[in-house]
Amino acid sequence: MNQKIFQVKNLHFYFRIIFNDNKLYNLSFSDNKNDLLESQLSLKIVNNTNSKFGKEVKNQLNAYFNKKLKKFDVPVHIKGSNFSMKVFKEMSKIPYGKTKSYKDIAKKINEPKSARAVGKVSGSNKIPIIIPCHRIVGSNGELVGYSGGGGLLFKSYLQLLEKK
């Protein structure tokens, strides 16, 4: 596994990506770089700052935060149950600047009574922003839960960024 820690232009957050074989496994971020520096006990992670793939992820995130990219095309590696995979796939279809409720997603995947389970899957998203869980809201449009760094405040920021 490789990792890269970087800062996006004009944003005080630091991002850490974990990738291998040109697939993104994890994206995390924080306003404190030290939060992203973990001691690795059982997993060897190489800090790979020269990777073409790592640079591409950074470039796409820069473009997104500068409103020049509306859809990521970074290959991702996600695992989960059939249900989880359906949720991630449907979540990825939510257009830039739009939101859907957990209930909407549940209906789309033909599991209309599973809105809470959709919320749980959304909360387990290891690749926020690129798999846009920030575009999912509660049934009456309220902001609820966010798996990425920065909590609901950052979720709100991402939604405002896309609406401008």
Image (cartoon, helix red, strand yellow):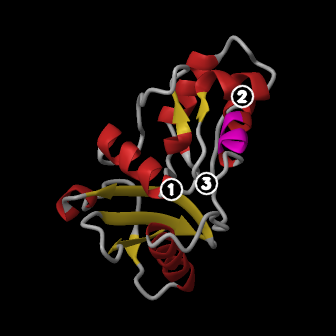
Q: Magenta residues, as a range?
A: 87-91
Q: Relative to the observer, which residue lies in front, 61 or 35?
A: 61
Residue 39, visible in the rendered structure: no
Q: Relative to the observer, which residue lies in front, 43 or 78?
A: 78
Q: Is residue 88 magenta?
A: yes
Which secondary structure type mostly characterizes the magenta part of the structure? helix
Q: Is residue 113 left or right of residue 96?
A: right
The correct choice, above or below, for 39 with respect to 85 in the image is below
Q: Residue furthest bottom?
A: 50
Q: Would you say the residues marked 3 and 1 are in contact, meaning their CB atoms lie under 8 Å apart?
A: yes
What amino acid does circle 1 point to? Glu
Residue 94, visible in the rendered structure: yes
Q: Is residue 157 left or right of residue 52?
A: left
Q: Would you say the residues marked 1 and 2 are in contact, meaning their CB atoms lie under 8 Å apart?
A: no
User: Which mark is in front, 1 or 2?
Assistant: 1
- Label 2 sits on residue: 83
The structure residue drawn at horizontal position 64% and vertical position 21%, both measured from the top left corner, is 103
Please tell me the numbered disc located at residue 24: none
Report, in whole angstroms, how far the alpha carbon at label 2 lies from the one at label 3.
23 Å
Q: Residue furthest top?
A: 113
Count of residue discs: 3
Please tell me which of labels 2 and 3 falls first in the chain. Answer: 2
